[in-house]
């Protein structure tokens, strides 16, 4: 007989291992996007960080957002999630503060994967980072997630890709997925044309994982994104016995 004990949060539901802090923004989140629950083959729990707009996070880098992020993270922890992730790579700014504020794993930004990627590719190769806006990302974003200046990166942005910019950054209300796929594949190909020493791609933005397969098919290189990170951490929280035969 198995006896179960209610957890300390006195919650009335269970089974959501991953909690996701999401921006206070409005645009279509298609399957594959961090903000679409059908992306995952396990339950997730969302928490909107009130007034955390794209402009305040990306453009203004507003330090007053730290407390709302901490408050939302603590709420997710109280609601019983086992790890907390973000839904914008620029949330790297708050990785350290949030990590210190809760007692469960925190993985705010897809950029956290860069040191791992750098360790597994040939030393002569570089990591290509495709970001939502290369003009808005700073050394602070990288340093906050353990990416030191010694790691060789090639940075490319989607800010000049019309459909992506208008759909996501400017929140026009519609999104043409085929156009964005063509845009990011074009950016990835341009990176390779200008750099012969790329060993892997990292897609910073939470809106880009729907196009990871297209980037892989176009470049034939490993592609890391938010979902590879989230699924990796989830696998450590939901260990299952092996089955098979000898």
Image (cartoon, helix red, strand yellow):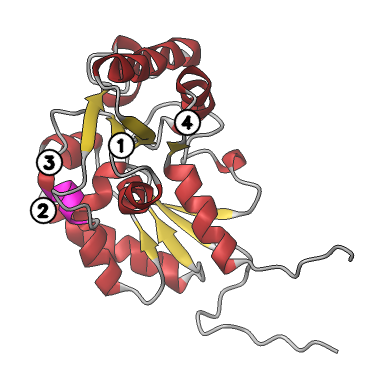
Q: Which residue is mark 4?
A: 29
Q: Determine the image quadrant of residue 101.
A: bottom left
Q: Which residue is mark 2?
A: 63
Q: Determine the image quadrant of residue 198.
A: top left
- CA distance for labels 1 and 4: 33 Å
> Residues in magenta?
140-144
Task: Residue 168 in the image: state x and y as whole percent.
Answer: 33, 24
Residue count near mark 2 (Cα–Cα under 10 Å), binned few <14, some 14–19, many ≥20: few
Task: Residue 99 in the image: state x and y as whole percent.
Answer: 29, 68
- CA distance for labels 2 and 4: 26 Å
Quarter of the figure that contains the C terminus = bottom right
* Nearer to the camera, 83 or 8: 83
- CA distance for labels 2 and 3: 14 Å
Q: Which residue is mark 1?
A: 125
Q: Earlier in the sequence, mark 2 or mark 4?
A: 4
Membership of 141 in magenta stretch? yes
């Amino acid at each position: 007989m198995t006896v179960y004990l209610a957890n300390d949060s006195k919650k009335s539901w269970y089974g959501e291992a991953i909690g996701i802090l999401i921006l206070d923004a409005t645009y279509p989140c298609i399957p594959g996007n961090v903000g679409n629950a059908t992306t995952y083959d396990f339950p997730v729990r969302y928490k909107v960080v009130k007034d955390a707009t794209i402009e305040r996070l990306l453009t203004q880098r507003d330090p007053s957002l730290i407390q709302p992020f901490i408050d939302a993270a603590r709420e997710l922890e109280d609601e019983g999630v086992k790890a907390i992730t973000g839904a914008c790579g620029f949330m790297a700014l708050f990785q350290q503060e949030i990590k210190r504020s809760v007692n469960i794993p925190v993985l705010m930004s897809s950029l956290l994967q860069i040191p791992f990627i750098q360790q597994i590719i040939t030393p002569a190769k570089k990591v290509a980072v495709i970001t939502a806006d290369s003009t808005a990302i700073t050394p602070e974003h990288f340093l906050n997630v353990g990416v030191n200046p010694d790691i060789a990166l090639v940075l490319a942005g989607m800010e000049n890709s019309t459909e992506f910019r208008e759909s996501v950054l400017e929140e026009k209300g519609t999104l043409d997925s085929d156009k964005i796929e063509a845009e990011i594949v074009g950016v990835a190909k341009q990176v390779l044309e200008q750099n012969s020493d790329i060993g892997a791609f990292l897609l910073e933005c939470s809106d880009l994982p729907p196009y990871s397969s297209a980037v892989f098919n176009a470049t034939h290189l490993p592609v890391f994104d938010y979902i590879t990170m989230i699924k990796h951490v989830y696998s450590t929280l939901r260990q299952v016995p092996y089955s098979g035969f000898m």
